[in-house]
Image: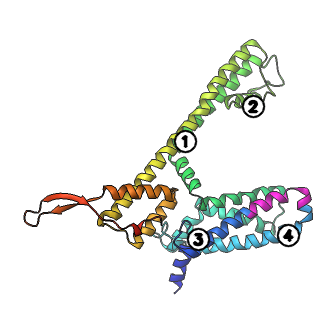
Amino acid sequence: MLHTLRRRTADVLQPHRPNDPLGHWVDIFLVVLISLNVMAIILESVPRYGASYHQQFYRFEVLSVAIFTVEYLLRLWAVPDSEEYSAYTPWKARLKYIASPMALIDLIAILPFYLTFFVHIDLRFLRVVRLLRIFKLTRYSSAMHVLLSVLKEESRSLFAALFVLMVLLMLASSGIYLIEHQIQPDAFGSIPDSMWWAMATLTTVGYGDVTPITPLGKFFGGCITVIGMGMVALPAGILASAFSDHIHRSRREYKSKLSQFLSDGHINEEEKEELEQLRANIGLSPEEADLIYNAATRHITRQIICPHCKQPIHSEQKKTSARVKPYV
């Protein structure tokens, strides 16, 4: 009985399960609560609202922390029955979950409130930490899952681009220091002071509060600006290419799974649920899934085998039932 309840809790708390009405409404409730928390934290920072509705904000904070605490404890309790951690023993699964990014975000969402009972915390710092609750929405956003996957896949390329940027930052800071430090000792008195100008120039922001005034300094600054335009384009190109590759891979994965399930001519309810879960996880819209389904059913054929020689005679189109479309 307890194991069944824990399994059901894990299913309900697992996001992107549209075929589970209770889980779907739990997702909606938590998304709305997180959004209201972010709005309340922002409004509380406005002096006239913070002073006038202090009690209301505090009561809403207590209610939110209570709900988030129950959610965190339920996830911790039910995690051994989740698909991601089912291969581990219960305690090992819980320890791995506690160290996971989403669990840390859930903990950060409630921990500052409890810390106020033991240590004195600056309210401004507390407000900023509470605002990190917006990252709880990552669990319910397929777009954020795609972004995190892309960043993880391209981490080596992005770190390489960052390393090149740091090298250019040091060279630009050193160069402008050598050229301008005697003319403008206040702005370029040291290499660390020059780094502000170098960063603003390399990122093409160009605040204009610190600028070279010598002809050589202006020429050097122009060269750094041109190089900076290329440096901004480099990580943008990496991310754009990675996003495109990720989307194409996700579609191929969905097509492959759909073709596998259609190999016998129909899709049962279990396969339909798995396809819908995959569609939601990869961020594929129902319209795109519709197009993939129609294309797959047009190209599926079956072989007619001769009963005597066991060789294929001809192919004909398989009949597939429209009632089993996985996105319905």
Asked if the residue at tag 4 contacts the one at tag 2, i.e. Cβ–Cβ closer than 8 Å, the answer is no
Q: Can you tell which of label 3 and label 1 is closer to the viewer?
A: 3
* Mark toward the start of the polypeptide (3 vs 1): 3
Residue on which disc 3 sits: 24
State left or right for residue 82 relative to residue 316.
right
Q: What amino acid is labelled 4 in the image?
A: Gln
**Dominant secondary structure of the residues highlighted in magenta in the image:** helix
* Mark toward the start of the polypeptide (1 vs 4): 4
* Mark toward the start of the polypeptide (1 vs 2): 2
Measured Cα–Cα span from mark 2 to mark 4: 43 Å
Q: Is residue 79 above or below residue 136?
A: below
Q: Can you tell which of label 3 and label 4 is closer to the viewer?
A: 3
Measured Cα–Cα span from mark 2 to mark 3: 49 Å
Could you say which disc has been placed on residue 61 in the image?
none
Residue on which disc 1 sits: 239
Residue on which disc 4 sits: 56
| Span shown in magenta | 36-49
How far from the left and from the top, in percent, is residue 230? 59, 28
Q: Can you tell which of label 2 and label 3 is closer to the viewer?
A: 3
State left or right for residue 91 relative to residue 34.
left
Measured Cα–Cα span from mark 3 to mark 4: 29 Å
Q: Is residue 247 above or below residue 307?
A: above
How far from the left and from the top, in percent, is residue 195? 73, 30
Asked if the residue at tag 4 contacts the one at tag 1, i.e. Cβ–Cβ closer than 8 Å, the answer is no
Measured Cα–Cα span from mark 1 to mark 4: 43 Å
Nearer the observer, 242 or 271: 271
Asked if the residue at tag 4 contacts the one at tag 3, i.e. Cβ–Cβ closer than 8 Å, the answer is no
Residue on which disc 2 sits: 196
Name which residue lies at 70% across and 62% down: 108
